[in-house]
Structure formats: structure tokens, C-alpha cells
Amino acid sequence: MQKSCCIISLMAMFLMFFISCTNEELLPHDPDGPVLNQGRVVFNVSTGKSTVYTRTSADDEQAIRSLGVFIVKPDGNLAEGITRFYEAKALTDKKLAVSIPVDIMETPGVKAYLVANGPDKTQCDGLKTEQELLDLAAVIKPEEIGTKGIPMASGAISLNFTGGIATVDANMKRVMSTLCAKVVKSKGVVVGPSDFTFKVHGVSLKEGYCFKDECKDTGVDQVWNSTSKSQDEEVSLGYFYQSKAFQVEVVSQSAGQSRTIEIPLEKAQTRNKKYVLKIHPKPASEGKGEFTVTVEAWEETETDVDFDKLSIKKDLPADKFEIQNDGIRLLTNNYHETDFGSPKDWFVLKEGTEIVNVKLEGTIDEKKRGVDLDEKGIARATPQPNQTDLSGKIMVTMKNKNGMMTIASIGIHIPHALICWNDKYAWKSTVDKSSCKVENGEFIYTNPNNTGVETKFSIIEGFDGIAKPMVFDHIVYLVAAISPLETSGESLQNGLLYDIHGKQLPIDQASFGFRRKSAAVVCISLKCSKEDTYVGYIKITLKNIPLNTLTTQILKIKFKFD
């Protein structure tokens, strides 16, 4: 009996010790989930400092009502078999423990993202890839913050397991920003924030990206007021998501006067910011109701997870790049299949920050013409030039020295081609086997006379309705000159050619001619020692009739034999 009591006592002590250990090590809040053969990652969740808001309490502003956890494998897919959705009760002292299968735990390069007060369980479970996650948008309305909390998201968190456990910090960044007002106290001034109405034009209240500093919503007009009568008190007027450039009209209710300021795009589309309007009423002696409004600089409420603005290099080649206020213009007219290099080399970065990924959006039209990234990440113009102006963007994913990630976007514009080969053109000789057609942006001349004899082609659409090999805006532009891009000597018959592999050929082995006989007719010739496939480039000079300016464009021609 005594022996049995001892055994029971030892078992009780062991159970107490085990329970104590599991509490300290934070077993995942999933009593039915697997524990054996699993690792654990413990997230120390930080929501940062609270700003001085009056519409929402500090508790509401920092509260976590729900938490989504997403583990990303090196191939860009989200790991399956891991609990993704957690309620607030799953956190213990702002710590969340998550079970990780051994195969994921032992894979290098695994990372995690956290989203607070965002997607529900169904939405969490429905996400499949990292890109889908980065495209995730919060839809909590400003008036719902008190019950649902402010949407927040972490950057990418690298997981480094030691002994089967990884303990990492998860610094959450608020998706929303706030607009605040403050009446500057001065002698003879008696009005406070409640004396002013704030008419906001174009602010986004519907939804916003969790991970991108980019506007998703079109924006609406909104009127905000303050109930505070205190001077020198910073009060929150309202919350908003990433917006396009919007205006705030500050109206004095007592005097009926107004002042308008604009929040530019680069500021308005940034998450987790506080923007303060400082109102400076003038004493009655200087005019009743007179006041001015100044804009206090944007403040970083989370300096450890924020990035400096992405800057474009100033020394990019001027014949390929044109930098303007709305972004980068990629000039494709001067080259065929232009190589613009890696977009990672287009920007200047803050020390300790690196670009981990770039993506082009809207730079290819519906016919796959424009500029795209190849398999090595090099931006190249397509063989077929775009026929309309393209306006897209480059999405740049950056990582700072703390391992936190953010996504910035810059406008990319690709002007349309001024002249190009006509995709519908096809011609076949009635006297020999020679023929011509346009294929994938190239003029292909099959079985030409290879003794240097010229063949005439009309290049301007005539009354006969027959398709011509070249098309251009003949209302605005006039063909001023046509010649081979590269020649040996002064003769237009000595245009340099390349073999199918891009190797330049000696002039005595192969050369071509391309000249204008009249305004509407060009002559093409080939001279070669053997029948093979040859590639050449044509330089076309165009004159803008209204502006009286000249510009050039390069087209590709190919000679081959059956």
C-alpha cells in the first residue's frame, strides 16, 4: 500500500512538472492537433506603440481579435497541414505557438507571414501561394475597428529552427493610417478642433492591401468632424486605407472660410502613417476667422519595419530610359528586342536593404507585345512592338537589414511603336519560288535572288487596297530615310548581316541592301556566297510633321532558303 502511494505521488509530481513545462514552452493552442514528430515556432507578436487617437481607444488600436499564420516554402507555395487561423484566446502574453511538421522544419529558407484582424478561417485556408497572400486585402470598415480591430500584417519572417523550436519576433504593421488635426495655441485664439469641418475628397475607406503600399480602392468623399474643443490637442479625424492623392478642405464653421491641402500619392498610398493637419487661427485683430493650415511630416509609427522611398538611378542609359514624375519610360523604338537589364539594377537602395523580387504588371498588351521579364529576370522588348501606349507598374519587393519585407510600386510606361512590319502582309512571286511574310515581328524573305538584284516593294497603302509590308501613322509621321542599320562603307548595298546564332558575317560572305527608291517604294536585295539563313536590321528615320522633329526605329529582316 505504501509502495502504491509513493508511485501515485511520483506520477502526480511528474504530471505537474510536465504541465509546467508545456505552459512555459507554449504548446500550440490546438489540443487535438499533432504534437509528436512536430516542431514549434513561437511568435512574439508586437503591435507597436499606440498613437494618440480619440475615436478608438489604445486597447482597440492594438488589440488582436484574430490572427492568420502562413508558412511559405522555398518554392513559393504555402505549407499545408498547419493551422492557419487563430482566435485571440490562442495567444498567451502576446505569444502564439504553432505546430510545424518535421519536413517543413528541416527545410532551409522557410518563412512566415502573420495577418491580424484580417481574413477569416475560410479565407486563410483558401490561400495557396505566397503571391496570393501578398495580394491579400483587408476589408474591415473604419467604424468596425472597435469590434474587429485594426488590420495589421507582418513582413516576411525567416524561421531558423534550433532543437525543433524557433522563437521569432513578429512586428505587426497597421494596414490603415489616420488623419489628425491640431489647433495651434496662440494668443487671442479661442477656437478648437470642433470649430472646423474636414471635407476629405478621394480617400479610400473600403479596402486596402495588407502588404503593399499601393492603392486598391477608388476612394470616396467624406466629411470628418471633431468634438474636441481643446487647443494643442492632437485628435484623430478618421482612419483610411492606401489612397490615391486626395485633398482635405478645412472649413471654419464660425467664419465660413476654407483652406485646402493635398496629400500626394507617394504619401497617401503608404500604410501605417499618421498625418497631422496643424491649424493656425489668427487673432481677431488680424481678421475674423482667418487661419492657415500647415502639414506636419509623415511620422513613422513603426520605424523598425518601414522603408525609405524607392529611388530610381539617375544614370540609366538615356537611349533606353526616360525618367519622369510618373515613373519610368522604356524606349523600345531604337532597338529590336531591347535588353533593359535586370530591374533590380534600376534603383538606389538604402544601406542594408536589398531587392528580393521584381514583377512587371501591365507592360504587355493582349497580344503579348511590349516589355516582359525573361527566365533570367532581364527586361526585354518583345519582337512584335506594342501598337498602343502601355502604362503599367513594376512591383519591387525589398528586405531590410532586420529581415522585414515590403512592396513598392513605380509606374512603367512603354510608348507605342511609330512604325512596324504589317502582321497581315504576305506576298508570293508568280515567276519564281520567292515569297515574303511577316511572322513574330520579323519580315521574312524566302528564296530571294542572292546575286544582289533588287526587288521593289510598295510601303504606303494605296488605292488598290493591297496590304503593304510596313504600317505607320502616316498622318503624323513621314518616312524621311531608310537604310541598313550597319553598313560596311557608304554603299547601302553593303548592309551587315548575322547568322542565326547572332554572329556577324564578313561582307564578302553575305550582305544586303535596303534603300528607298521613292516616297512609296523601297528596294531590297541580298548578296551571299551560299544559301543559308541571314538576319539584318533596318534603320528607319521618321519625321513628325506637326513638330518638325526626327526619330528613328529599328526593324528586323530575315533572309532564308528552302
Image (cartoon, grey):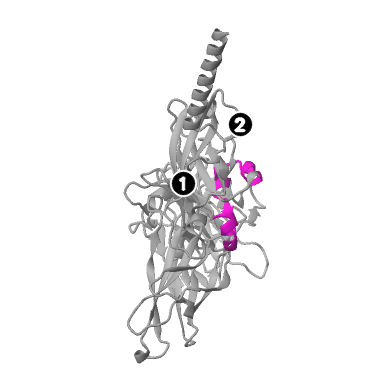
Residue at point 51%, 43% (across, down): 113
- The three-letter amino acid code for the residue at tag 2 is Pro
Residue 125 left/right relative to 359: right
Q: Residue 532, can we see it?
A: yes
Which residue is label 1 attached to? 155
Camera-side residue of 86 and 344:
86
Q: Residue at x 49, y 87 (%)?
A: 256
Question: What element does badge 2 sit on?
Answer: loop
Residue at which label 2 appears:
31
381 inside magenta stretch: no
Residue 302 located left or right of residue 80? left
Numbered range of the magenta stretch = 122-149
**Position of the N terminus by quadrant:** top right
Q: Nearer the viewer, residue 379 or 282?
A: 282
Element carrying mark 1: loop
In the image, residue 478 lies at what x, y percent?
Answer: 50, 70
Residue 397, percent across and down? 45, 49
Q: As shown in the figure, which amino acid type bears the numbered disc 1?
A: Gly
Q: Nearer the viewer, residue 120 or 12?
A: 12
List x then y, in percent, for residue 471.
Answer: 58, 63
For marks 2 and 1, the one nearer the N-term is: 2
